[in-house]
Image (spheres, rainbow, N blue to C red):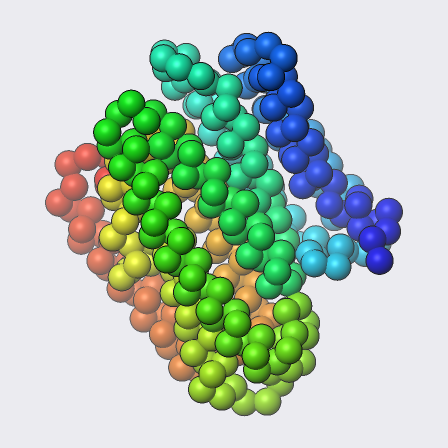
Amino acid sequence: MLTLENLVALLPLIVVGTTAVVVMLGVAWQRHHGITALLSAAGLILALACLPVASGALSSPPLMVMDGLAIMGSVLVLLCALVTVALSHHYLTGYIGPREEFYLLLLCAVTGALGLVASNHLASLFISLELLSMPLYGMLAYSFRAERSLEAGIKYLILSAAATAFLLFGMALIYARTGRLDLAGLAAGLATSPDTWTLAGAVLMLVGLGFKLSIVPFHLWTPDVYQGGPAPATIFLATVSKLAVFILLVRLVMTAPIFESEWLHTLITLLALITMLGGNLLALFQPNLKRLLG
């Protein structure tokens, strides 16, 4: 059951979500770029201030856990989001068109990232990942009058949907084997040695998360999307999105026994080595700074 302690543990996420609603109502009432940016920054700072209270909560929500890993991830997500808000204000000052909705999209994405770093259940994992990804489509295509920005948004939309399909299929295979969606239940259901179907499910989940992390060979979308998107959206995608998914991958490796398979450890190690080597070699040929980040 949802208790007061659960709500206290969720306080940072609730604060950011409430800030998004306040910003939306403020935009509907009267547009003001500076006030919208200040409200967004104030909400993120308030969420940061709530983290010590959330970490001291007596119990955790049913679908999430506010442990040390989640608190560390939340701090980094909120700090990166604050920097993005500051850069967005400067970037959007000269933008011709509506500017306030960019902060609304950013706050929604931050809410998803906070849920993702604390996810302790495959359902909350998927919902948080989509809440993080969907606003990014709009953020990347925000300068839609520029051809490259619209192209970046469409590319990320299509390829992200494909990656989500891999992730969901992997979850379905693991659920068919265990009948549980919470990570503790997965740990109990997979206590024995993993079979072929669970290994296939873990690999499919790894493919989906590998797209979000731009791991080689799932990185081909990254330079085009980084180059085409507005600078604040690119910065947010390169920091908050990657950070939240990496924290989630660490939690899966630490919690789910299927990810303790020696075969999967070897695969993850190989992907990490190829990504570091391939990323640095490809960066040598990039004259564009944003593509270099990708």
Q: From this viewpoint, is residue 116 visible?
A: no
Above or below residue 84? Residue 286 is below
Q: Nearer the viewer, residue 98 or 189?
A: 98
Q: Quadrant of the N terminus?
A: bottom right
Kindly identify the residue that appears in the image at 52 percent across and 86 percent down.
194
Residue 97, percent from left and from top: 40, 15
Out of 75 and 110, give the one closest to the viewer: 110
Q: Is residue 14 depicted above or below 190 in this figure?
A: above
Q: Position of residue 241 (x, y in %)?
A: 46, 45
Residue closest to the eye, 266 or 20 = 20
Identify the residue at horizontal 86%, vertical 47% (top origin). Answer: 4
Q: Residue at x 48, y 48 (%)?
A: 243
Image quadrant where residue 114 sits? top right
The picture places residue 292, in percent across and down from the top left corner, at 24, 41
Q: Position of residue 125 (x, y in %)?
A: 58, 57
Q: Report which quarter residue 95 is drawn in.
A: top left
Horizontal relation, residue 258 to residue 218: left or right: right
> What residue sits 50% from the left and 61% below the top?
249
Q: Residue furthest right?
A: 4
Lateral position of residue 6 relative to residue 155, left or right: right
Looking at the image, is 197 positioned above or below residue 37? below
Does residue 34 lie above or below 255 as drawn?
A: above
Name the image quarter holding the C terminus.
top left
Looking at the image, can residue 55 be seen? Answer: yes
Left or right of residue 32, residue 241 in this image: left
Q: Depth check: 261 or 184 in front?
A: 184
